[in-house]
Image (spheres, rainbow, N blue to C red):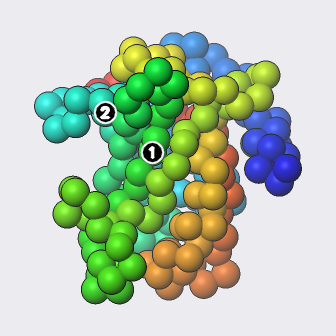
Amino acid sequence: MIIRTLAFVSLGLLGPMQAAAAKDCLLSHATYREPHSGAVMQFRPIHNEPAALTAQVFSLIVPNTDTSLPADITWTNGRNSFPLGTIRHTCTDDDREAGLEDGSGLCRIWDGQVYALTGGGAEQLNSREATPAPKGLLLPDFGAALAEWADFANANPDGSAWDAFTLTGCSDE
């Protein structure tokens, strides 16, 4: 219920300029910001990405640090395919012991299903690379995962994060 409320609050923060930008911007060029922490997701077009099921690639810029984390959205196989996002960082020994290292050689900070936030609520993200950028993105449990990550906590001692990101721009690349 809290996530749904946050999603609607975030959608209410979207201005007319962002709605116009969403019509003209592809997800592969979009920039999103989580308003509470200031975390920024910067999408980029896919160029020779290794995973065949990867539909989108982005970086997460961590507030109050010089850190930009690699991240992607891949699609599960099968009849009821859905988008799974993963945000990674360089592993520590504690991460490896906790089993957070994945096949990329990095460790997961967050992974989970990604939803598009539209005027009608949360919907499944489109799988095509040429997808128009939705007004917002919902990453369930992202806020808690980011707040618990030591690098974010050290740089933002009183910081917290939410799960909803709002569209803030579009790159020309």
Report the quarter where the C terminus lies: top left
Residue 54: which numbered mark, if any?
Answer: 2
Mark 2 packing: few (<14 Cα in 10 Å), some, or many (20+)?
A: some
Q: Is residue 135 at all visible to an observer of this figure?
A: no
Q: Position of residue 117 (x, y in %)?
A: 67, 31
Q: Residue flagged by tag 2: what amino acid is it? A: Thr
Residue depicted at x 58% and y 58%: 142
| Residue named by callout 1 | 85
Q: Earlier in the sequence, mark 1 or mark 2?
A: 2
Kindly state the secondary structure of the residue where label 1 is placed.
strand
Q: Residue furthest front?
A: 79
In depth, the one of 135 and 57 nearer the eye is 57
Q: Residue flagged by tag 1: what amino acid is it? A: Gly
Kindly state the secondary structure of the residue where label 2 is placed.
strand
Occupied quadrant, residue 151 = bottom left
Q: Is residue 163 above or below residue 166?
A: below
Residue depicted at x 38% and y 63%: 108
